[in-house]
Image (cartoon, coloured by chain):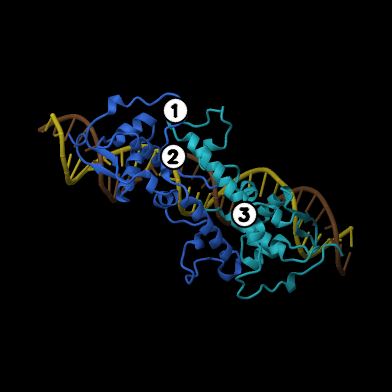
Chain colours: A blue, B cyan, C brown, D yellow
Amino acid sequence: MLKLNRTTEYGLIALRHLSQRQAGDASSAREIADVYGLPFDILAKTLQRLKESGIIQSAQGARGGYMLRRPLDQVTLAEFLELMEGANGVVACAEKPEHETACEFQSKCQIHGMMRGLNTRLKAFLSGIRLSEFTAEKISPEPIQLENFSRQVNS
Amino acid sequence: MLKLNRTTEYGLIALRHLSQRQAGDASSAREIADVYGLPFDILAKTLQRLKESGIIQSAQGARGGYMLRRPLDQVTLAEFLELMEGANGVVACAEKPEHETACEFQSKCQIHGMMRGLNTRLKAFLSGIRLSEFTAEKISPEPIQLENFSRQVNS
DNA sequence: GTAACTCGGATATTCAAGGTCCGATATAAT
DNA sequence: ATTATATCGGACCTTGAATATCCGAGTTAC
């Protein structure tokens, strides 16, 4: 239940990676894909999406790559998920304005109101979790060797 | 994000319906499907599943149908979701025992531990919500007319 | 100019969810 | 007994979203 999709997982791995770099130190999509064995094309699109949202920033061209832009303790899981997976509520109709008769069962389904309530509570829960919690230096049996990838984007 | 699947929604609608019947009053799958405009076959399977889990009980044969077995205030959303959608964690590996190297990225992905933590917190959140909350008599612009379907299973 | 990047659209592939069909069995009413 | 109405449950089809692949275009460091 409530399973995250792959791109969200890739995004978290990437953000964690970026958060461990020194300020000004960029990582390319290729580098991250190689380190964690992720599919390059998908990760690249994921990073582009994160960039559009302003969580990370990019540097084009050779020796380019991605860097964090916003501190991860200022990004909630709710915001991140909505960004990665869209604003889908627990039920499709739960996200839409009250006056839109979005629910296909309309007044018949009867659970519409409760679903909206659940949705609100869930969002509050997710808003209480910050991405920095996934960033902490823990459970790293063997620290990743990043030396071969290190580079300065502002040389 | 975190969207419920259809069968879960159908299940909630059905449980709500059953909870509004008098004790001893059974509803058939056909009846519920007709009232809410749900696909009969799918609803029928959903009800069978709910019966296997012991939340509802069935009476076979003509004039048979389903009745609540457990009070809905004793069923948590966590239990219900696991029943309807399986024990999938936020990430596949989050549900499996620690010693199983279930994570396909193994130690590399680094977010494994945090995902388990998130999963635990999410389950605690869902365990704090009872199905009876979706059962309350509210937001019913026009009460459903059930007279044509009423019947006693223990005549 | 070339190599290493980001950028972004187009398109394939895969898989689970959603939906359909049908036969078997059980039971109440006639 | 026969019939109508149920649950029961397996097999199968369909569809759409998630996932993955491919490729061309624009940028920048060297």
Tell me, for residue A134, which label it has, or none: 2
Which is nearer the N-term, disc 1 or disc 2?
A: 2
Q: Nearer the viewer, residue B56 or A81?
A: A81
How crowded pointer 1 is (Cα within 10 Å; few <14, some 14-19, many 20+) is rated as: few
Tell me, for residue B129, which label it has, or none: 3
How crowded pointer 3 is (Cα within 10 Å; few <14, some 14-19, many 20+) is rated as: some
Q: Position of residue A37 (x, y in %)?
A: 39, 31
Quadrant where the C terminus of chain B is found in the figure: bottom right
Residue at mark 1: chain = A
| Amino acid type at mark 2 | Phe
Q: Position of residue A72 (x, y in %)?
A: 37, 44
Residue at mark 2: chain = A
Q: Position of residue B153 (x, y in %)?
A: 82, 62
| Amino acid type at mark 1 | Ser
Tell me, for residue B66, which label it has, or none: none
Gap between marks 3 and 2 measured at Cα: 26 Å
| Amino acid type at mark 3 | Ile
Q: What residue sits 64% from the left and 50% below the top?
A: B80
Confirm or deny contact between disc 3 and disc 2 (CB under 8 A). Answer: no
Q: Position of residue B52 (x, y in %)?
A: 73, 48
Q: What residue sits 68% from the left and 52% below the top?
A: B75
Tell me, for residue A140, which label it has, or none: 1
